[in-house]
Image (tube, rainbow, N blue to C red):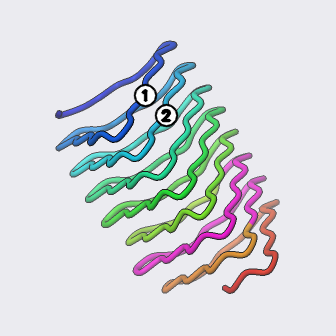
């Protein structure tokens, strides 16, 4: 598939399936309700964008993005449980009013990890590894780490009203 745009009020569920997007984006927006269970999502040369007021549940799955980014924007609500997220040559960005939770979900990133605007992001019992890149938090974002391991090969930078909290984690 070259590109996929799920918008409006789409309801979509992937279970024990594989989704491959090449040289295009997977955009989930509008008021869509989307779930992934025991599935693989592979994006090569494009991005995954969660936007608007979408609600997405990802459980026991694997997301791989090569030469592209993953963005959480608008008022989107996303939860990852027992799901690996691997991004090479791209960025992971949380912005606007998004609310995202990672539970027991490892993240491997070669790129920038950015928290902007009023985004709220919770990481619990997860390992976040930035192999080549930096950690940026600014504006009014809220970032919470609980029982996590955060390994950043570059710099960690927080500014403005960024709220970063760490509980029982290793940084």
Asked if residue 36 lies left or right of residue 30, the reply is left
Using a 10 Å C-alpha cutoff, classify the residue at mark 1 as few (fewer than 14 neighbours), some (14 to 19) or many (20 or more).
few
Residue 83 position in % (x across, y down):
48, 57
Looking at the figure, which quarter contains the C terminus? bottom right
Q: In which quarter of the image is residue 31?
A: top right
Residue lying at 24% horizontally and 32% vertically, measured from the top left: 3
Q: In which quarter of the image is the N terminus?
A: top left
Mark 1 vs mark 2: which is more N-terminal? 1
Q: Quadrant of residue 73?
A: top right
In the displayed structure, does residue 102 sit left or right of residue 48? right
Magenta stretch encompasses residue 134: yes
Dot 1: element: strand
Closer to us: 55 or 36:
36
Q: How far apart are marks 1 and 2 (CA)?
A: 5 Å
Q: Which residue is drawn at 62% across and 80% down?
A: 149
Q: How crowded is mark 2: few (under 14 residues within 10 Å), some or many (20 or more)?
A: some
CB-based contact (under 8 Å), mark 1 and mark 2: yes
Q: Where is residue 121 in the image (x, y as percent from the top left)?
A: 69, 54
Q: Mark 2 points at which residue?
A: 35
Residue at point 46%, 16% (across, down): 10
Name which residue lies at 27% across and 46% down: 46
The reply to whether the magenta stretch includes residue 109 is no
- Residue 30 location (% of width, % of height): 53, 20
Q: Give the range drawn in magenta.
A: 116-144
Say what secondary structure mark 2 lies in: strand
x, y percentage for residue 113? 53, 65
Identify the disc placed on residue 13.
Answer: 1
* Above or below, 72 relative to 74: below
107 up-or-down from 133: above or below: above
Q: On the picture, is 101 further left or further right than 130?
A: right
């Amino acid at each position: 598939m070259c590109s996929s745009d799920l918008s409006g009020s789409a309801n979509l569920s992937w279970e024990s399936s594989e989704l491959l997007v090449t040289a295009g984006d997977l955009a989930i927006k509008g008021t869509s309700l989307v779930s992934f269970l025991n599935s693989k999502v592979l994006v090569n040369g494009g991005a995954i964008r969660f936007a608007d007021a979408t609600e997405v549940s990802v459980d026991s799955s694997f997301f791989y993005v090569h030469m592209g980014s993953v963005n959480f924007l608008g008022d989107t609500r996303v939860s990852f449980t027992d799901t690996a997220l691997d991004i090479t040559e791209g960025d992971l960005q949380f912005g606007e009013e998004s609310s995202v939770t990672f539970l027991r979900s490892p993240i491997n990133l070669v790129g920038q990890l950015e928290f902007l605007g009023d985004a709220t992001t919770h990481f619990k019992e997860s390992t976040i590894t930035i192999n080549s890149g930096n950690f940026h938090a600014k504006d009014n974002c809220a970032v919470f780490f609980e029982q996590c391991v955060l390994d950043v090969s570059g710099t960690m930078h927080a500014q403005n009203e960024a709220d970063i909290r760490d509980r029982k984690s290793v940084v």
